[in-house]
Image: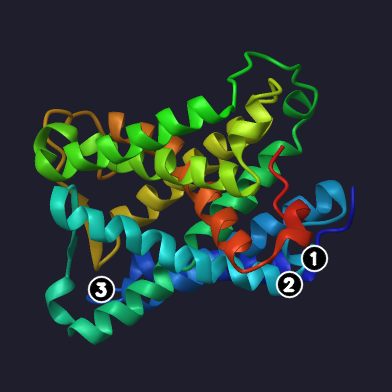
Amino acid sequence: MKKFPKHGWIGLVFVVVFWWVNWTFEGLRTHWAFTPLWVGYALAVDGFVYMRKGNSLLTRNWKAYLGLFAVSVAGWWTFEVLNWRVHNWSYMGREYFTYLEYGLLASFSFSTVVPAVFGTAELVSTAKWLRELKPGWQLRANRRNAIFYFAAGWAMLALMLLWPRYFFPFLWLSVYFILEPINLWFGFPTLAARVNQGDWRPVIALWLGALICGFFWEMWNFYSYPKWVYHVPFVDFWHIFEMPILGYGGYLPFAMELYAMYHLAAGVLGRKKKWDYIQVG
């Protein structure tokens, strides 16, 4: 156990201040309060990781940590573009901003997704029960399976685009099934390579990390303005905040997609020597 670092305290202050701002002020405020709130969350979580294991995403490599924000912008805009077809969520208050204002403000907000999820996943992975989890079911990561997953990903994407009302859940599956085989073929880190050895710790850490972040995303969004609301066919019941309860299941493959997106970007940019930077199990 290490002393809680200064950047962690800064993060906690940001969380308290901008949570209060976001839920207390009236009128438009979330467009400028959301980003510092989630920067605070990411820094606070990173501080807890450092306290528990002596290093963290930020302290291992601050330049790579900033890179997480850049990957996050591109990653979440991918889902925003797909949502133009399925219309599963929309933003109340969007009409008050020009296209340029919306694009810039949204990008700042989207930049916090990956640092928050990866940081929370690494914090989860410090738990003793997860560190000592024994190998389980082995899911073979061979060429034949990779081709099958790649084809299945494109098929899911096509079905979603053609019949979004019925195949909208594939928004949270197709991207992973497309990107994971690409990472395998190029030798980039993959979750498939880990479960090939029966090691499910990274997957579980990412799942729990995304669910925890999802809870805070939905909670902090509930009294926000502007805010997002959902329009999900067939399962629009039993809401926890704005999200239908079954919608939280989408956070599980979403975390895996972020992992695949990050390592594809890192691999393309030639960051192979720093594959150990992301430690989620």
List the single residue furthest toward the top.
Answer: 137
- x then y, percent, for residue 249: 37, 31
Q: Residues within 10 Å of mark 2 (few under 14, many from 20)?
A: few
Q: Secondary structure at mark 1?
A: helix
Nearest the viewer among 19 and 102 is 102
- x then y, percent, for residue 42: 60, 61
Q: Secondary structure at mark 2?
A: helix
Instruction: Please report the residue visible at 15 percent of the width from the left and 48 percent of the height from the top.
Output: 86
Residue 13 falls left or right of residue 104? right
Task: Point out the tag, 1 or 3, that comes first from the N-terminus.
Answer: 3
Q: Is residue 55 above or below residue 20?
A: above
Q: Which residue is mark 1?
A: 59
Nearest the viewer among 72 and 43 is 72
Asked if the residue under mark 2 is in contact with the one under mark 1, i.e. CB atoms within 8 Å, the reply is: yes
Hey, what amino acid is under mark 1?
Thr
Asked if the residue under mark 3 is in contact with the one under mark 1, i.e. CB atoms within 8 Å, the reply is: no
Q: Which residue is mark 3?
A: 26
Q: Nearer the viewer, mark 1 or mark 3?
A: 1
Q: Which residue is mark 2?
A: 62
Q: Residues within 10 Å of mark 1 (few under 14, many from 20)?
A: some
Hey, what amino acid is under mark 3?
Glu
Name the image quarter holding residue 92: bottom left
In the rendered image, is residue 114 in sight? yes
Instruction: Please report the residue visible at 34 percent of the width from the left and 59 percent of the height from the top.
Output: 78
- x then y, percent, for residue 50: 80, 55
Hey, what amino acid is under mark 2?
Trp
Of the 4 image quadrants, the one containing the C terminus is: top right
Gap in Å between the C-alphas at discs 2 and 3? 36 Å
Q: Nearer the viewer, mark 2 or mark 3?
A: 2
Name the image quarter holding residue 234: top left
Gap in Å between the C-alphas at discs 1 and 2? 6 Å
